[in-house]
Image (cartoon, rainbow, N blue to C red):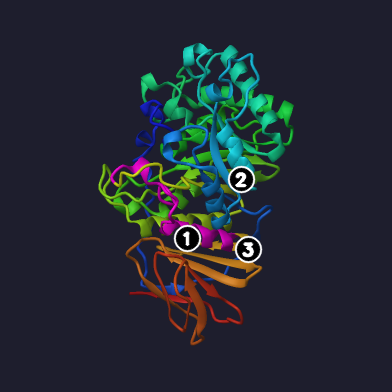
Amino acid sequence: MARSRRLPLAAMGIVALGSTALFAITRPAAPRDGVLSPGSMVSRATPLIVGVGVHFGIGGEFGYEPAPTALAIADLGIDSFRDDIPWMAFKQRGLGAPGDISARQRAVVAATPARPLWILTYTHPDVLGGKAPTTDAARTAFAAFNREAVTVTAPRDPIVEIWNEWNLNAAPERGILKGAGTPDDPRSGASYARLATTATAAIRAARPKATILVGAAGMDPDWQWVRSVIANGGLRDASGLSVHYYNQCARVAERTGADAIGKMEALHALLPKRDGRAMPVYVTEIGWPTTTGGACGDIPAETGASNIAQFLLWSAATPWVAGVWVYQLKDQGHRANEMEDVFGLYTYDYRPKPAACTVREATAIAKQGHTWQVDRSQPGITALRQQGAAGSRMILWTDAPDDRLTLSFGQQAVRYRPLCGKAGNATDVPVGYRPVVIDLKDVKAAPRYRRG
């Protein structure tokens, strides 16, 4: 999404929206009742990384400050923050002078133990007149910046991501790229793959065990651009593929967590395997703005909060999803009808919005799981099972905001609680769009649901 009002339009989130209607998934009609059948549990090799986007590298007018940012990160209980290291800012004294991150970035790094994810991105005026690095010499210069940046920031063992939404901003004069692009197109997957492999090699030379993410795809219907990056060897020696996903400007019925989950499942089917397993996916941007009015209409804060919680919980239960960064920590402006201003989990002045609570609680649940099962076999329902520090639990929600059902385990009363809601004890558990956590201790009967 947007980084700064000083950036070209093609780098802004406005152009990254509205793609989901182009490749919507059709699901079967939902039955009135049925049984949720238990399946095999799977474990994660490493816990899900949960992070947020922030703006210290650019966008000083967005109101980010180190101390309240660190407090908000601690309040959420998350692991990481994601921020830009722009090439021109890192090497502001020239390509031959030592580079460094900004004083504001050093301050936030000092204020929080959260692991940085640095986006090594954007152009430099001394290279191709400030155009994206698309020649051998320019790629070499960009790779040298990457190598120096990971060396300077090495004490915090950051995750690094190569560029940000190349398919949207590599050639602003040509607009955004829809699809893979031809090999000679500077915005193409092939062009980005050449940059990524050069930069990855330089980073590995400095920090062989660095976590390097390649991709950061913006609007990419049917993942055509990502497919091209993969086909052209862009993931060679990378630690994982990073992608972005937004659907707040799709058709209203598709502005859901279920839509985002479905797109990630489709992406997974395309991924190459490494050591017998699919390449890990890092969703480095996902979120829903709390817009009132504006180009895409109203987006209720409670709906967006549930969407984010659903996506985080599903990701925690899905071993090939390595990390999720919610865009973004706080609002970057005050205009309720401007999407870019109101993506935050907190308001501009760090007051929590509904999604702050659901992210906090979903993150805590994610950290408690040792083994998981995902069941999306029943149309319109997502059911997770979790074994871990809190015992055996089921986490359940409907895939459409207006869908309601009840869940029962024979005649046995069970303890349940919707995220950020009031706990209850009942034989018929009400389930809706907000995920509900159900304690399965001593429960023997299979769960049966009915709608209405």
Whole-Å distance between the Cαs marked 1 and 3? 17 Å
Q: Which residue is mark 1?
A: 358
The residue sitting at the bottom extreme is 411
Tell me the SS state at disc 3: strand
- Percent across and percent down for residue 397 are 44, 65
Whichever of labels 3 and 2 marks the residue nearer the N terminus, that label is 2
> Which quadrant is home to the N terminus?
top left
Whole-Å distance between the Cαs marked 1 and 2? 24 Å
Q: Residue at x 30, y 48 (%)?
A: 251
Highlighted range, magenta: 337-366
Q: Residue at x 50, y 25 (%)?
A: 122
Identify residue type, mark 1. Thr
| Residue closer to the observer: 17 or 194 | 17
| Residue closer to the observer: 418 or 351 | 351
Whichever of labels 1 and 3 marks the residue nearer the N terminus, that label is 1
Identify residue type, mark 2. Ala
Tell me the SS state at disc 1: helix
Q: Which mark is residue 369?
A: 3
Q: Nearer the viewer, mark 1 or mark 2?
A: 2
Tell me the SS state at disc 2: helix
Above or below 431: residue 85:
above
- Percent across and percent down for residue 99 are 63, 23
Left or right, 295 with reference to 157 = left
Tell me if residue 269 can be seen.
Answer: no
Q: Residue at x 52, y 81 (%)?
A: 414
Q: Which residue is mark 2?
A: 111
Above or below 103: residue 185:
above
Q: Which mark is residue 97?
A: none
Q: Quadrant of residue 235?
A: top right
Whichever of labels 1 and 2 marks the residue nearer the N terminus, that label is 2
Classed neighbour count for the residue bearing mark 3: other residues with Cα under 10 Å, few (<14), some (14–19), many (≥20): many
| Residue closer to the observer: 129 or 25 | 129
